[in-house]
Amino acid sequence: MDTARIRPYTPADRDAVLALAPRLAEGVAPWRDPAGVRAAVVGWVRDSLNSTGGSRLALVAEADGGIVGFVTALERRRWSGVTDACVGELVVEAAMEGRGIGRALIEVVRDWARRRGLGAITLETGAANARARAFYAALGFEEEDVRLTQVL
């Protein structure tokens, strides 16, 4: 990957990162309110950026003088009692997809998790987001949980 530089997030990156946040709404179930989903994903990113440091990680991918991707991760104790690295958000600008940026961001998270002695990386994505699911599968992620919803 030679199209972007991965570096730690700084407060100066905030507006650019928040501008990418709506991409997290892609692949959400069609019965969900789009405005509510957009507000939620921007809120998740805002909360992640406000909570960086310590057992949290926030990175950006920079290319051509702009932010073209970001990832956040944190240590989280899972239902099994094991603490894993949990990717909160991973976004790459649509025009930059397929250039290895998402892979590079995940590799930095993987290195961070290994240095912390964590044994796994977990994340969630929408069931209808086929592109994201294929991307994660190609990186070696396996589906572990399924959430079912009955619309009333």
Image (cartoon, rainbow, N blue to C red):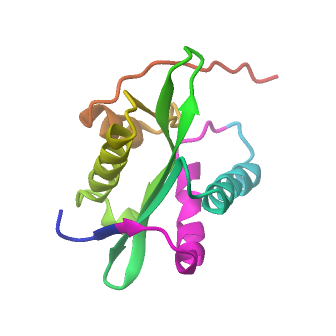
* Residue at the image point whose x is 40% and y is 32% from the top: 118
- Image position, residue 110 (x, y; %): 32, 42
Q: In this view of the protein, which residue sits in the foreground, 126 or 2?
A: 2
* Residue at the image point whose x is 47% and y is 30% from the top: 84
Tell whether position 27 is magenta: yes
Q: In this view of the protein, which residue sits in the foreground, 59 or 130?
A: 59
* Residue at the image point whose x is 65% and y is 56% from the top: 51
Identify the image quadrant of the N terminus.
bottom left
Picture quadrant where residue 96 is located: bottom left
Picture quadrant where residue 133 is located: top left
Secondary structure predominantly adopted by residues drawn in magenta: helix
The segment highlighted magenta reads 7-30
Q: Is residue 29 left or right of residue 82?
A: right
Picture quadrant where residue 136 is located: top left
Identify the image quadrant of the C terminus.
top right
Q: Is residue 81 left or right of residue 70?
A: right
Q: In this view of the protein, which residue sits in the foreground, 84 or 132?
A: 84
